[in-house]
């Protein structure tokens, strides 16, 4: 039972929470009125939408003002002409009600629309009055037109000016007044709803002002119409006005949807253009950085080439000073040192100095030079290390090694002197080398028992290692550098071609001036044929250059100008070597 009571109480609580709050009549009306307000919540967006409608609103209102002024002018002249434009009638006698009605209608129906149309024309043609709120001005003009249609009608205006319509105009104008008023109000409502792009928040004032004015006139002026007919007419006007305004509101809602979609599309297009510009700028930056990277890579390659030319070998070290990617290190260090600590190749003193050099290079990012003694497998070399810190990369350091002096050649020993005495001796009386070590010695050859014995030179002439040499890979040459060959001038080239032309037999051309120019013109075909051949990167000229004509030759004698050096000329004039008599 307790469980059932608890379930019932929870259901009641849920029903109370989900039950809608009661709304008063005022709240419902307010909610409905807010639904009729089609304006955007954003005031800036609403202002942009209103500005977009202004051009069409001005054009339609200018056309309507001109038509209204012209039609009312002709209507007034046609209506008052038989009464006022006759002989003996003083048109400017304002004691006559008819003259007052005529001039009042001219001012109300013709002058005001003409002034409004002129101002709108100046705005469209010369862009004057740009800061004026033209929607308010045009809405006020339409309201004014709705009021004037009712008040400025012939019957109503005559009554308002203190006259009697039947006596002044000698005819019954009541029926025509009703027809013209209803037709005019319907025209104004239709124009405001369907032709002028007025917002619904403003356009409702046009039919309401006409209905209020018409109701007040019917209440203040006695006519022959019955009260029931007046009520029916007012109700019909209300229905027509609501239908017209509702249709205009639906059209405006559709226009707002299209305008917002178009605006979002424009925003998206602008964003895409901005993003495209940013992408292009980023792409340009990437291209510039790529060009800088390529330039840097080319510079690095060039520096590496220079470093390789100045150094005997180069090695890469990781963060923990292990050797990596050293292609030529095996032949230089006389063993495979891939993955080995570089400090193992140095003495204890040099290891301390090398560690300090590493720290200095990492802090300053400047190449550091350090002289050390490098212990290889068989030799010891005095070298200079050029250490470069490459940054936070996997291969942290680059070391260039230049050998200054090589030590004596030392054979490796794996056993002590005692073991060496116990080893068997060879035929020559000396101890035989160990099998495992002898196989690793350079120049070791197998004997008959497939044992390896080193073949060492018997006697080597002593060489002064401290003396300077005129041959070096790492320093500038000490001999005189030969001068580069000069460029062959055009006269020598022309003479060479003329010599080649003598070797060609080309058919004669009857239209040519001579056979010489015929053969000369045939060079184009040969040149085109040579241009179509593949590139030859190893192509070069001959090594000997004639000092007279600068043509290149295979030997000292020039085949172009006939130049012969003095030593070759003396040898040629001396004749052949005499025979020794042995046949």
Image (cartoon, rainbow, N blue to C red):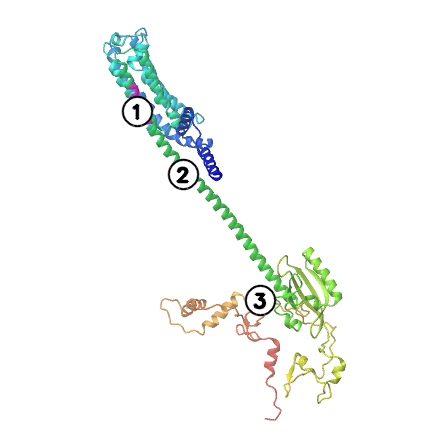
Tell me where residue 457 appears, x and y as whole percent: 69, 83
Which residue is denoted by mark 2 in the rendering?
261
Q: Is residue 421 left or right of residue 57?
A: right
Identify the secondary structure beneath mark 3.
Answer: loop
Q: Is residue 236 magenta?
A: yes
Q: Which residue is mark 3?
A: 486
Residue 101 vs residue 419: left or right? left
Q: Nearer the viewer, residue 28 or 72?
A: 28
- Crowd rating for badge 3 (residues with CA inside 10 Å; few <14, some 14–19, many 20+): few
Residue 105 horizontal/vertical position (percent): 32, 15
Range drawn in magenta: 233-244
Camera-side residue of 577 and 323? 323
> Is 74 within the magenta?
no
Q: Residues within 10 Å of mark 1 (few under 14, many from 20)?
A: some
First-in-chain label (2 vs 1): 1
| Quarter location, residue 341 | bottom right
Q: Quadrant of residue 568?
A: bottom right
The residue drawn where x is 61% and y is 69% is 327
Q: Which mark is residue 240?
A: 1
Secondary structure of the residue carrying tag 2 is: helix
Residue 219 drawn above or below residue 51: above
In which quarter of the view is residue 195 placed?
A: top left
How far across and down, in percent of the image, does residue 279 sit?
A: 50, 48
């Amino acid at each position: 039972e307790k469980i059932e009571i608890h379930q019932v109480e929870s259901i009641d609580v849920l029903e109370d929470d989900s039950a809608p709050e009661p709304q008063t009549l005022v709240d419902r009306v307010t909610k409905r009125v807010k639904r009729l307000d089609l304006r955007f919540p954003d005031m800036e967006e609403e202002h942009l939408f209103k500005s977009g409608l202004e051009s069409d609103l001005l054009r339609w209102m200018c056309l309507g003002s001109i038509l209204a002024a012209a039609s009312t002018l002709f209507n007034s002249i046609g209506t008052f002409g038989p009464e006022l434009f006759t002989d003996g009638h003083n048109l400017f006698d304002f004691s006559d009600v008819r003259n007052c009605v005529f001039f009042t209608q001219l001012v109300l129906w013709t002058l005001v629309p003409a002034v409004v149309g002129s101002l709108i024309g100046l705005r469209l043609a010369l862009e004057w009055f740009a800061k004026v709120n033209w929607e308010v001005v045009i809405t006020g003009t339409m309201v004014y037109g709705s009021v004037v249609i009712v008040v400025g009608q012939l019957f109503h205006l005559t009554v308002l000016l203190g006259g009697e319509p039947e006596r002044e105009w000698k005819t019954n104008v009541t029926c025509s007044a009703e027809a013209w008023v209803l037709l005019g109000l319907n025209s104004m409502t239709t124009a405001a709803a369907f032709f002028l792009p007025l917002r619904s928040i403003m356009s409702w004032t046009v039919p309401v002002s006409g209905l209020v004015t018409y109701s007040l006139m019917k209440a203040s002026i006695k006519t022959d119409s019955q009260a029931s007919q007046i009520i029916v007419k007012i109700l019909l006007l209300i229905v027509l006005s609501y239908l017209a305004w509702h249709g205009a509101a639906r059209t405006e809602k559709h226009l707002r949807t299209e305008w917002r979609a178009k605006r979002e599309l424009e925003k998206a297009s602008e964003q895409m253009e901005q993003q495209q510009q940013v992408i292009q700028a980023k792409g340009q930056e990437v291209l510039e950085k790529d060009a800088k990277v390529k330039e840097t890579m080319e510079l690095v390659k060039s520096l590496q080439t220079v470093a390789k030319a100045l150094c005997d070998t180069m090695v890469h070290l990781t963060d923990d000073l292990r050797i990596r990617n050293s292609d030529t290190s095996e032949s230089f260090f006389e063993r495979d040192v891939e993955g080995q600590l570089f400090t193992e190749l140095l003495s204890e003193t040099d290891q301390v100095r090398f560690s300090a050099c590493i720290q200095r290079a990492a802090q300053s990012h400047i190449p550091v030079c350090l002289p050390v003694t490098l212990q290889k497998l068989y030799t010891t070399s005095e070298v200079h290390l050029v250490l470069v810190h490459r940054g936070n990369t996997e291969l942290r350091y680059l070391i260039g090694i230049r050998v200054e002096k090589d030590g004596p050649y030392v054979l490796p020993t794996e056993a002590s002197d005692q073991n060496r005495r116990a080893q068997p001796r060879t035929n020559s009386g000396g101890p035989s080398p160990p099998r495992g070590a002898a196989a690793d010695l350079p120049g070791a050859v197998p004997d008959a028992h497939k044992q390896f014995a080193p073949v060492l030179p018997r006697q080597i002439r002593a060489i002064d290692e401290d003396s300077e040499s005129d041959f070096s890979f790492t320093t500038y040459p000490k001999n005189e550098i030969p001068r580069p060959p000069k460029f062959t001038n055009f006269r020598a080239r022309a003479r060479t071609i003329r010599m080649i032309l003598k070797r060609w037999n080309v058919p004669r051309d009857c239209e040519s001036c001579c056979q010489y120019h015929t053969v000369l013109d045939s060079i184009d075909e040969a040149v085109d044929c040579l241009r179509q051949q593949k590139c030859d990167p190893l192509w070069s000229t001959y090594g000997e250059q004639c000092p007279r004509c600068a043509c290149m030759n295979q030997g000292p004698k020039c085949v172009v100008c006939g130049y012969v050096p003095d030593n070759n000329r003396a040898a040629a004039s001396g004749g052949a070597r005499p025979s020794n008599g042995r046949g």
